[in-house]
Image (cartoon, rainbow, N blue to C red):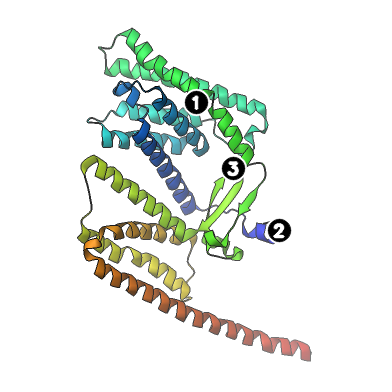
Amino acid sequence: MNDNKDKNYLSPKYSLIRRFFLNLFIITFLIMIYFYVSDYFGSISTIFLKNSKFFVSISFILLIFVFFSILAGPLPATIAGFFGELIYQFSFYENIRLDWCIIVSLIGLTVSIYKYKPLKYKSWRKLFYTFISLTISAFIISFLIIIFQAILNPIINLNSLLVDYGCKYLVHALLSVVLIIPLLVLIYDRALANKEQHIYNLFLTHHPIYQSDHTFYLKFGRTYIYFCSRCSGVIIGGLIIIFINDVLNRAIGFTIEPEIAVILCIFLPIPGLIDWGTQRLLLRKSTTESRLLTGFIIGIALYYLSFTDKYIIYMFFLIIFYFSVVGIALYIGQKRELKKAEEEEEYKSPKLEEDQFE
């Protein structure tokens, strides 16, 4: 990626849809991390609501959540904190405690206000500022926990409020967040932000570099990793629907009926097939936005395919049908491309002959 021409192709461009899907991916990733780590260790609220004596639990989930919150920024961290805790409670608690959902969202907000930026920690002063901001956040959240519990549980005495709620959170935050997170962020920055690099591999993008507008990139520090737009949409859609179904299954035992899954598998791939097919047939040019969106829908369809085992024969023929359509579109599109190339060549040839004659 040292070639200047390649760098021009890979200059990141702003896209509203890309921004939407990126934030959707970040928020979903944060929620999933929070949920599944909490599933094993307990959530931030568990040690307070369930009287858990397991000291490591809150420290570990705090460490993970705060680290990714700093990288993600205030808005994703706040949203993910609220819904991560809410979804966890919905799945494992008998009653929803919205006060703790708000507290976790405020943790995400307060720790990420001093957001990570590439090369920020070349200055040791900025690292110190991170330490200070995390310390302030720990005291603010500790105070808010005391206030919330005093209002919602007036029967709790002052000593219990201070020791079992405020100080308990403060100790965990100071040990697991304030002392460790600055070091982790520094390592992350040194590893991925020292120099700008673009990782563009045909295996991930499915397109040559001059078609980089067909790709979707993730940025880590100053390291850009490029992926095929439609495949990125498929992965994001698949991950989100897998997570939603897992949560619903844990919480209320929900499973989708095979008949509904079949209907979804029939209709959901159609927008993607139209978007790709019309481009392949040279009828229109697809956009990154449409690729992401249709890929997202296809990802949902692929997941629901696993629920159609009752109708596996029908699904087999459906897949053959869709692949046949793809094959026909590929063949016709190839013929049209060759014809177009020949016409362009014929158009150029007379012009060259005229120039030579003159």
Instruction: Locate the N terminus and report the quarter of the image it occupies.
Output: bottom right
How many residues crowd around disc 1 within 10 Å: few (fewer than 14), some, or many (20 or more)?
A: many
Percent from the top left, x then y, of residue 186? 60, 33
- Residues 133 and 244: in front is 244
Q: Residue furthest right?
A: 358
CA gap between label 3 and label 2 equals 21 Å
Q: Which of 199 and 108 is in front in this view?
A: 199
Mark 2 and mark 3 in contact (Cβ < 8 Å)? no
What's under tag 2, amino acid-wise? Asn
Q: Distance between the residues labelled 3 and 1?
A: 21 Å
Total number of numbered discs in the rendering: 3
For label 1, the residue is 177
Question: Which residue is painted at 42% across and 72% down in the image?
Answer: 277
Specify which label sits upstream in the sequence, 2 or 1.
2
Q: Position of residue 20 (x, y in %)?
A: 45, 49
Q: Quadrant of residue 355?
A: bottom right
Residue displayed at 73% across by 90% down: 353
Q: Which of marks 3 and 2 is nearer the N terminus?
A: 2
Mark 1: amino acid = Val
Residue pictured at 44% horizontal, 18% vertical: 170
Residue under label 2? 4
Nearer the observer: mark 2 or 1; the answer is 1
Which residue ends up furthest to the bottom in the rendered image?
A: 357
Going from the N terminus, do you reach mark 3 or mark 1 first? 1
Which residue is located at x 63 percent, y 84 percent? 345
Tag 2 and tag 1, C-beta contact below 8 Å: no
x, y percent for residue 342: 59, 85
Q: Mark 3 points at which residue?
A: 221
